[in-house]
Amino acid sequence: MNLTIERAALLRSLGHVQSVVERRNTIPILLNVLLRASGNELSLSATDMDLEIVESVPALVTRPGGITAPAHTLYDIVRKLPDGAQIELDCSDGATMLTLYSGRSQFKLGALVTDDFPQLARGDLPHRFGLAAGDLRALIDRTRFAISTEETRYYLNGIYLHAGRTRTGSGAGAAELPVLRAVATDGHRLARAEIPLPEGAAAMPGVILPRKTVNEVRKLIEEAADIVDISLSENMIRFAYDTIVVTSKLIDGTFPDYERVIPSGNDKTMEVNAKAFASAVDRVATISTEKSKAIKLVVNRGVLTLSATSPEAGSATEEIEILYDYSPLEIGFNSRYLLDITQQLTGTGARFVMADAAAPTIVLDTADNSALYVLMPMRV
């Protein structure tokens, strides 16, 4: 294999694929990136056996071929080369060494043959639909903060993606519209976001996207401005756009019936400026203990008092104006969870729908009803 490629192009693609590679691995080949040169492009692949990223980048190929090389080492070398540099990659067939030339620099990297590089099992992915990159970013951003990190409940370690129906309007004008819904929960909070159901997604099975896959896809589509093609089966999913293809196994488990967690009888509504509320929570929580991050909300007509106490740090209180016309209510929350939710609100207002100090609270964006959050209270 012999090719010449621009540093910027190689660095960008290496940056995409090498993030899949775990820095510590007992299987040497999984520390490597697969490089294949043919035609007028270089294909780069990396995998951890559960997630695979493949990207193609233009290159001047003078001798087709392939090799695998240490992903992080190669990335660091290319990153440290000067802007505008031209890079030559060279190795002979069956070689165990990849040579990199750039200007007066030369690097020889230990390599492994391509025959040993694993690929994810390729099965049929019968369900396929296109999703605007902006919609996919919104679904991920509004839900991934609530993904559980508790490994024993592995079925909560991702985002549940499925087709559903949402009710719009009321009375005689009520209707149910099909939606694509993303849900995540860690048992203390729940995040649900939805968009109109894309064509081709109606028959898709409900699937759980692993946390690592969610994070990698989100990074990759940051620059995507067009449609992301999604193909899936009950145990595999693929995201493709431009010259990037991400293939991932799905979590093999049953996501709980999250609808049962969303309260329907809450009868007290508080509306507050979302930014003012988040700022007040952040300030008052400075005093709360590092472990619990507890903060108390005392809700009265027209005014909300936020407070926190700590045996070591002291106490803090702050008042902000609200819209509230019900009986007084005291309720406690984890301040970090409150901030995670308010950061997802795109409008200026937040609506809290509450019942009492022990019941789950619903949080909504007053300007956008496509996302819903449920937060469990805590004793303070």
Image (cartoon, rainbow, N blue to C red):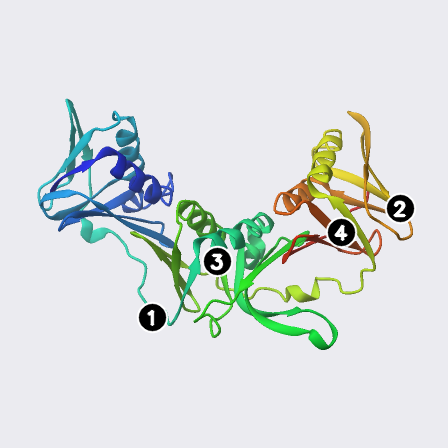
Question: In this figure, which residue is indicated by the disc labeled 3?
Answer: 209
Question: In this figure, which residue is indicated by the disc labeled 2?
Answer: 301
Report the front residue among 250 and 242: 242
Report the front residue among 213 and 3: 3
Dot label at residue 352: 4
SS class, disc 2: loop
Question: In this figure, which residue is indicated by the disc labeled 1?
Answer: 124
Q: Name the quadrant of the N terminus.
A: top left
Mark 2 nearby-residue class (10 Å; few <14, some 14–19, many ≥20) = some
Mark 1 nearby-residue class (10 Å; few <14, some 14–19, many ≥20) = few
Q: Is residue 366 left or right of residue 94?
A: right
Q: Position of residue 84 (x, y in %)?
A: 23, 28
| x 18%, y 38%: residue | 5
Pick whichever of labels 4 and 3 is earlier in the sequence. 3
Q: Could you tell me how far apart the alpha carbons at marks 4 and 2 are, in whole angstroms? A: 14 Å
Q: Could you tell me how far apart the alpha carbons at marks 4 and 1 are, in whole angstroms? A: 44 Å
Pick whichever of labels 2 and 3 is earlier in the sequence. 3
Say if residue 181 shows up in the picture: no
Q: Are marks 4 and 1 in contact (CB under 8 Å)?
A: no
Q: Could you tell me how far apart the alpha carbons at marks 3 and 1 are, in whole angstroms? A: 18 Å
Q: Position of residue 185 (x, y in %)?
A: 62, 55
SS class, disc 4: strand
Q: Is residue 264 left or right of residue 175?
A: right
Mark in the foreground, 2 or 1: 2
Q: Is residue 91 left or right of residue 12?
A: left
Amino acid type, mark 3: Leu
Mark in the foreground, 2 or 3: 2
Amino acid type, mark 2: Arg
SS class, disc 3: strand
Mark 4 nearby-residue class (10 Å; few <14, some 14–19, many ≥20) = many
Q: Name the quadrant of the C terminus.
A: top right
